[in-house]
Image (cartoon, rainbow, N blue to C red):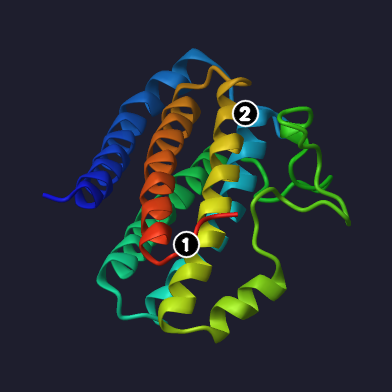
Amino acid sequence: MSQASRGRRATAVLAVLVLASAAVLAGRSALSSGPPAADGPEAGFARDMSTHHAQAVRMSFVVRDRTRDAPVRLLAYDIINTQSAQIGMMTAWLDAWRLPKTDPAGPMRWMKGHGGHGAATATTTMPGMASPEELKELERASGRPAEVRFLTLMTRHHRAGVTMAEAVLARTGEPRVRALARTMVDGQRSEIDLMNRMLGERGARAA
């Protein structure tokens, strides 16, 4: 088995484990404490990481249809499945907590002061997100250029996702949130290493 395949399999295994552990921890957490606050880090993380994941899923669908390269298509497939499942988990948390899916006061407030990130404003967006122009460039590209654009954008996206997951780990003791955040850190770091190798194979490197 190649190193890339082992990395993808490890990511998939981690995703399965966190789904299973979340089901067990859900009942325990509900009995041990009340629901998180609407403006707390747990709710903020669930909302903002869902938005962050949604863009990763979108970019993965785009590159899947713009290249025939098997390793890139497999990576895109893994991201689509893993992050879509995680969005479902975080949405279920918000439903169980009876909290809104969006923060009326704006995104990223919960992460203020972590790694230089504060609330998103008109001039500062959620970290790691591709701009509308970058998304259009990805959608116009095909073949090797599409692969390089995707890998570059997704590496930046994953780095920011790791930062967000580490931020909530520093702010919560909620078992379900901690389990998922730790899985995100481990899985996305593994994929960053994989994408850097894939960029090197294509004569490029992440910014």
Q: Position of residue 94 (x, y in %)?
A: 57, 42
Amino acid at pointer 2: Ala
Q: Residue at x 40, y 67 (%)?
A: 202
Residue 102 to residue 132: above or below: above
Crowd class of label 2 (few under 14; some 14 to 19; many from 20; radius 10 Å): many
Residue drawn 88% across and 55% down?
Answer: 123
Q: Position of residue 93 (x, y in %)?
A: 51, 39
Q: Nearer the viewer, mark 1 or mark 2?
A: 1
Q: Position of residue 161 (x, y in %)?
A: 56, 43
The residue labelled by disc 2 is 167
Q: Earlier in the sequence, mark 1 or mark 2?
A: 1
Position in image of residue 124 (x %, y %) = 82, 51
Residue closest to the eye, 164 or 20: 164
Figure label count? 2
For residue 23, what is the image quadrant? top left
Name the residue type under label 1: Leu
Q: Is residue 90 visible?
A: yes
Crowding near the residue tagged with mark 1, few <14, some 14–19, many ≥20 C-alpha atoms within 10 Å: many
Please report the residue visible at 25 percent of the width from the left and 41 percent of the height from the top: 10
Task: In this rendered view, identify the residue nearer to me: 107 or 23.
Answer: 107
Q: According to the image, label 1 marks what residue?
A: 151
| Left or right placement of residue 47 versus residue 143 in this view | right
Residue 97 visible somewhere in the drawing: no
- Residue pushed farthest left? 1
The residue tagged with tag 2: helix, strand or loop? helix
